[in-house]
Image (cartoon, grey):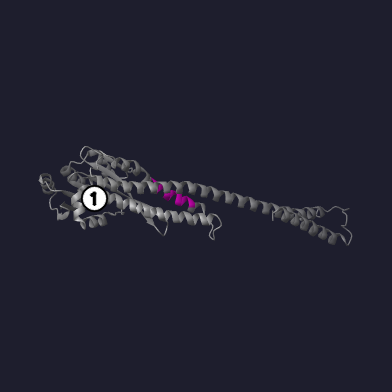
Amino acid sequence: MIVDKAVYRDGVRDECASLSDAVEQLRADDRNGFLWIGLKDPTSEEFALVTAELNLHPLAVEDALNGKQRVKVETYDDSVFASLRTLSYVEASSDVETGEVMLFLGDHFVVTVRRGQLSPLHEVRRRLEHDPEWLARHGTVAVFHAVLDTIVDRYMEIDHELANDLTDIEADVFGGAHPAHSGTIYRLKREVLEFKRAAQPLTVPLRLLVEDGGPIASAEMRLRFRDVADHVTQVVEHVDSYDHLLTDVLNAHLAQITVQQNSDMRKISAWVAIAALPTLIASLYGMNFEHMPGLTQWWGYPITMVVIVAACGLLYRGFRRTGWL
């Protein structure tokens, strides 16, 4: 559905009653004006109206309708299409939830399409409307930068949260008060990979955007996009290090489990050996032989018990000295 639509002339918002009339007036107007349409989970019928008025590229329209696209920025003859991932960090479960935002950018229009519940666009629109001079100077490119910058700023916040989670897991694995579990480490690694899939594909398109001769004509805006690209590169480097470190932490945790299992098996084996000795002696005296030493004498039982206790004590002492107990 269309959640918001407005025409911006000289950076000032003007309500849009008819798409056809707004597009026709903008194409005939020499001023720096553009149409901004916000869609959420649009149907094919809703998108067909926008496509017919703005002549959006059919390949980009297909991607926007299908959703679940890879992160990318593609340049067509007279427009730019961007598919971006929005992320949100859930404090209670340390999960990273994913949404999707797509942008169609032309000389006189911006179409933003979001899927899922995660959306930073309402705040972006409000912030831009409070700076009409900036919006009038840079037009649709200012919207593109504001959306992208907001998404990447959120990436940096989640980067900080994941770094804290990783620090906690390291502390738990290496002598923490609450021993870590393999499932906890694996879940964090999965969230890191989800984060990586959202941020890493942006590095190459952003470098292309800031090149001379690219779709961003303004030198000032190229500098701002370069700043966003630097932030993305920084986040990707951090995420790569988290991924490798989590693999090492998981391997260390599994090694600790193996060592603990070996220690437990040694203790079990030692106690089994101690228990086996009296069992052996008792089984010999339970075979009902007629001529068994000490069987008919009064001292036979006490001597046997002394031998059993002494032998078990020697075995226990030997296992303690070797570290098995």
Residue that appears at 47% across and 50% down: 186
Residue tagged 1: 143
Relative to 35, is 102 on the left or the right?
right
- Percent x, y for residue 273? 73, 52
Magenta stretch: helix, strand or loop mostly: helix
Residue that appears at 48% across and 52% down: 185
The three-letter code of the residue at mark 1 reads: Val
- Percent x, y for residue 4? 20, 54
Relative to 99, is 46 on the left or the right?
left
Q: Is residue 261 magenta-colored? A: no
The secondary element bearing badge 1 is classed as helix
Q: Quadrant of the C terminus?
A: bottom right
- Label 1: few (<14), some or many (≥20) within 10 Å? many
Magenta residues, as a range?
A: 185-196
- Percent x, y for residue 139? 20, 49
- Compare residues 132 and 284 and report the one nearer the observer: 132
Which quarter of the picture shows residue 55? top left
Residue that appears at 22% across and 39% down: 58
Q: How many marks?
A: 1
Q: Is residue 187 magenta-colored? A: yes
- Percent x, y for residue 194? 39, 48
Residue that appears at 61% across and 50% down: 259
Residue lying farthest to the top in this orientation: 77
State whether residue 22 appears in this view: yes
Which quarter of the picture shows residue 204? top left
State whether residue 4 appears in this view: no
